[in-house]
Image (cartoon, grey):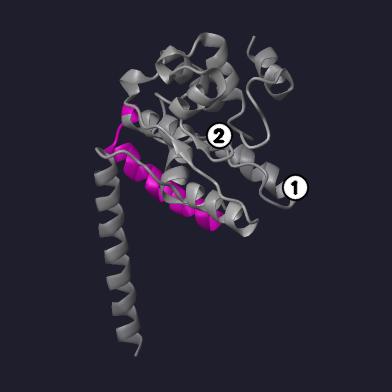
Amino acid sequence: MVKRFVKFCAVCAAIFFASSIAVVIFYRFAPVRYTPLMLIRKHQAFSQGERLTLRQEWVPIEYISPDIIEAVIEAEDARFYEHGGFSYNDMLDAFYRNRRMGCIVAGGSTISQQTAKNVFCTPARTYTRKLFEAYFTVLIELFWGKERIMEVYLNVIELGYGLFGVEAAAQEYYGTTALRLNYRSARALASIIPCPVYYDPNEPSGWNNALTNWE
């Protein structure tokens, strides 16, 4: 029985590793149309008797303003192009902060980790999710590279309730495209990333503090 159990676990692990690598390679080329968070938002709306229409417009990175790329790097991960997927100092700081608070209040995640979480994991604040996030972070750094990670990140990130990706956000908030986002609008969008459901980038109260810190 023990041998059968070990064999079963080994087979399951092999299937998981093979399938996860296959999915990562697939998304190296294919647009990411749905993420776990999108499905969660749909379920939340349904459970409250609402009908939520998800809004996402996938665009290649060539059609995204360099200003929004610069803004999210400055706001979320200043060493994005330098690290291999993890910022160990930030992770260590987050660990000690969580330990002091007695719960998970910080993750110390890089843009690579956020992308892995958004595409392959749920947003649950658990160490199990962080382990899966770390695993997929290694894979996307290996198979995607920085440009593709940034492209996917900017296309799937939540920027409003049911609103995903900078193209849909640019259309919703500014009546323009992601390519035509100006410097200030780009920074306003980047400032609401930590809490996009509650902040509107057009409301100064939602992002003035972030702009003040940057300036």
Left or right: where does residue 47 sit relative to residue 119? Answer: right
Q: Which residue is mark 1?
A: 101
Residue 131 percent location from the top left of the image: 47, 53
Residue 39 percent location from the top left of the image: 49, 52
Residue 59 percent location from the top left of the image: 35, 27
Left or right: where does residue 103 sit relative to residue 120? Answer: right
Q: Which residue is mark 2?
A: 89
Left or right: where does residue 131 sit relative to residue 3? Answer: right
Nearest the viewer among 68 and 50 is: 50
User: Where is 125 relative to 32, above or below?
Assistant: below
* Amino acid type assigned to the residue bearing label 1 in the image: Met
> Does the magenta portion include 97?
no
* Element under disc 2: helix
* Element under disc 1: helix
Tell me, yes or no, whether the two marked residues, 1 and 2, touch with CB atoms within 8 Å: no
Give the quadrant of residue 127: bottom right
Q: CA distance from mark 1 to mark 2?
A: 18 Å
User: Where is 88 relative to 17, above or below?
Assistant: above
Residue 95 percent location from the top left of the image: 62, 45
Give the quadrant of residue 44: bottom right
Q: In the image, what residue occupies the spot 75% across and 47% down?
A: 101
* Amino acid type assigned to the residue bearing label 2 in the image: Asn
Q: Quadrant of the N terminus?
A: bottom left
Q: Residue furthest bottom?
A: 1
Q: Is residue 125 visible?
A: no
Q: Sequence order check: which comes first, mark 1 or mark 2?
A: 2
Judge depth for marks 1 and 2 and give the one in front: 1
> Does the magenta portion include 133?
yes
Q: Quadrant of the C terminus?
A: top right
Identify the magenta region: 126-147
